[in-house]
Image (cartoon, rainbow, N blue to C red):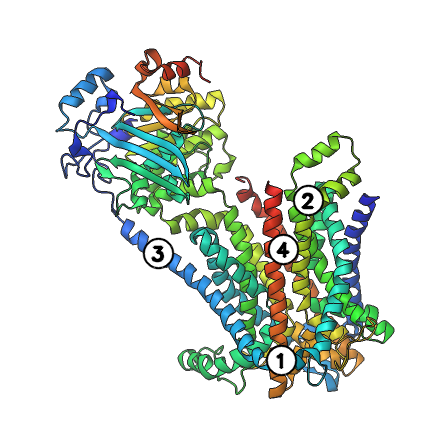
Amino acid sequence: MSLFRRKVEQEFDPTQPLVATGNLGRRHAVSRVAQGVAVVAALAAVAVLVIVIWAVVSHGAKAINWTFITSGYPTGIGPYLVGTAEIVAIATLMAMPIGVLIALFLSEYAGRRWARPVQLVLDVMNGLPSIIIALFLYILIVAATKQQSGFAAAIALAIIEVPLIARGTQEVLNLVPGAQREAADALGVARWRSILTIILPAASGGIVTATLLSVARAAGETAPMLLLNSLAKGDAVQFNPFHEIPNVPVRIFQLSEEANPEGFTEAWGLSLILIAIILALGLGSRFLLNRSKRKLAR
Amino acid sequence: MLFLCCALAAFLAFVVLVLIAKEVFEGAQPAFAKFGFSFITHQEWAPPLEKFGGRGLIFGTLITSAMALLIGAPVAISIGIFLALLAPVSVRNVISPLVEMLAAVPSVILGFWGLLVLGPFLVSTVEPFLHDTFGFIPLFGAPQTTGASIFSAGLILTIMVIPIIASVTRDLFMAVPRELQDGAAALGSTRWEVIRGVVLPTTLSGMTAACLLGLGRALGEAIAVSQVIGGGTESHLSLFKTGGTMASIIALQFPSAVSALHTASLYYLAGLLLVIGVASNLLASWVGMRFGAAGGAMR
Amino acid sequence: MTIDDQTFDHPQSSNGVAPIPGRRVRIRSEPLPGAIGSPAATESAAESHVHIAPESVFEAEKVGIFYGKKQALIDVSMRIRRGQVTALIGPSGCGKTTFLRSLNRMNDSVPSFRIEGKITYHGHDIYGSGVDTVEVRRRIGMVFQKPNPFPKSIYDNVAWAPKNLGMRSGLSDRVEKALRGAALWDEVKDRLKDSALGLSGGQQQRLCIARAIAIEPDVLLLDEPASALDPIATGAIEELIHALKGRFTIVIVTHNMQQAARVADRTAFFSLETRGEKPIGSLIEFDETEKIFGSPRDPRTRDYVTGRFG
């Protein structure tokens, strides 16, 4: 310790009051500026959200009335709403089982060796631009049958939803306590039986959450609709999925392409309804997620 | 039995991915046969004349995405820092859902807002200001009459990538071990020094992956961009002129393609987009794996 | 909890004013009372010269600590002397780490943390208004239970804090000095640019000590620094504490009684006491280490140090 002893005076006097000494004042200033930037960035994001939502609400509210919601083209938007609900429902019915099965595969069966490639496939799928998925299904279905259809669009939405559902489900499956699995294994219960009776029920809240989030994402997807399902007129509800089904996103897109003030008003109204549904789904899923996490934590 | 179903579902996802690539490349085949790789370097895009070159659109894609990332990434990372490390829990619990709400706004609505609200605002105030102040830089040319421009498209993409990068980086920063931050704080460091010296270097790979994720989203966005960019196909140096991106031109022209070659050329663009998108995705995953280990060792 | 040894007989040192304002303390050049002579003799000498030399670094007065509604520590009063090694021992959950972390305000980041009573450092209230926590930690360094080197090179781990503090001239000498001071230099001098995460646990912990002493703090707080290490690494750390004694005032929390007996001048025994309904951590006895282990006054201390605890 002679190294230290040789030094005669230290850099600071420890008996001085505990206020900033040396360069600390300047360092605090730098820190405050950096923290200020972070606060401003967060406020800016919130401000953009508020500005967008405000524009949609203030313009959209003018358009919305009973006739607008219930009647069809040209006075109302009823068939578009019903159509979007149909397509998203079909898509989710396809995507949910597949997404959950993939999540089960990842968390229960795949070892390290298989989990990575499957995870990679999901990541790539999740990052795939929806317009490319649309082009794929255009060749596969629309060009082959020479018929646009809500069903083709639903498949596209399903491809978008699968990685979202799989990832969300996987996250809750990972929260299911290992002890529960081991207990089941120790009792000699078959793997599939313990998965179906113990693990899946425990994760059900998370599965619903992930599904709701994927529905929210799918409901606003426009590119697949535009290429696969954009020719419906919207004067009546269409229940046959193998025909064009009127839907909200395409209608908003088409109205935004026409320079027509009345059309703009209708588009704002549609936007308001769509955004309200999506945000409600988002909030609902958040609520469910918190509840199921609390349940699993217990 | 259940195992078989699970494995089958995972395999199905893989098959779909392969099929997508196969169909898109097949769709592009006629255009590839005609133009080869010179498609990438040729400028002219004239459907009636059967002339198709992707350079202007590739340029538009790159410049809008670059703008989104250059503005969006620093802002988003700042938001991530704020939410994970600075904000009290009560504030975080309010702002975090709001940021996720921004991510949930459908692109068609954002694009519609960009067309009617943001574009006119930009062209009347921001663009003239930038042109008057920085006009000597070719990027800030004379504003056009409508708000439709590469500039508005870049800003819309910025708004789209911010919540994506912000929420990923927030989770990253929250995963930085408490002990590591305490260790830095115990050395008499300010909050910012802890962030700058320990949190950011530890999460560098994750931040890079998050930005690549945002980049992938920006590159592939078709709808919102097509609403605000004005539908041009040439490359301009000025941000304030109209332009087009690969994805946006597909959305705008595919439904009314004039010829088989036109359709094939759009598939060609999609193929390029697919290659770039998958590459950035794989890169993100590789970066996360290769360089994530340093931070991961502490966890 | 009143313990004769640490009654407060010089109020001027706990009223927020240093006994001799402006006196420049030169730790390095002065012989330190704790390091020489018999502790008892030093003690009485200190008591009689109390108006001349500020003996204690910390004075805790009726300190209670809460996490939310749960009280973790009650009524702790003690004086920690300059230049000495003070050990805090006791069963787990007795609040010894909580107390240690309150000495440099590391508990501030716990949202529901609350403290009552008073802790002074050289006469200044650590929790007083206007106190700069960064300055507090600059003077009072800390080494944690689990080695937590930064994911940087060995060199950068040590150089990082001095750089922040603006100690840029002679930086590599300073790094070398700190690494030598932590008895790590010979092992790492050829691979300073390698990642610190490649070191063994014991080396990592010594690196953390080097990191802490590189900025030459006044006090070192060690929170069970050897608990995650094997016996050989533990021995190295203990040797290091001996070497650092006198250079720094050291407060060490340990659950290992032999360790306390080996390294500490004075030892404080904390335990869980049932007050009302719930057990709360409290200080049972604080004295010379030999007394605590040789002839403890309190039967609870005796039970603990002789292994008859719980």
Q: CA distance from mark 3 to mark 1?
A: 50 Å
What residue would you read off at disc 4?
A: B283
Name the quadrant containing residue B102: bottom right
Q: Amino acid at mark 4?
A: Leu
What residue would you read off at disc 3?
A: A32
Q: Which numbered disc, 1 or 4, marks the residue closer to the eye? A: 1
**Is tag 3's residue or tag 2's residue first in the polypeptide sequence?**
3
- State whether discs 2 and 1 lie on one chain: yes
Q: Which numbered disc, 4 or 2, marks the residue closer to the eye? A: 2
Residue C83 in percent (x, y) is at 26, 27
Q: Secondary structure at mark 3?
A: helix
What residue would you read off at disc 1?
A: A65
**Is tag 2's residue or tag 1's residue first in the polypeptide sequence?**
1
Q: CA distance from mark 3 to mark 4?
A: 35 Å
What residue would you read off at disc 2?
A: A202
Q: Secondary structure at mark 4?
A: helix
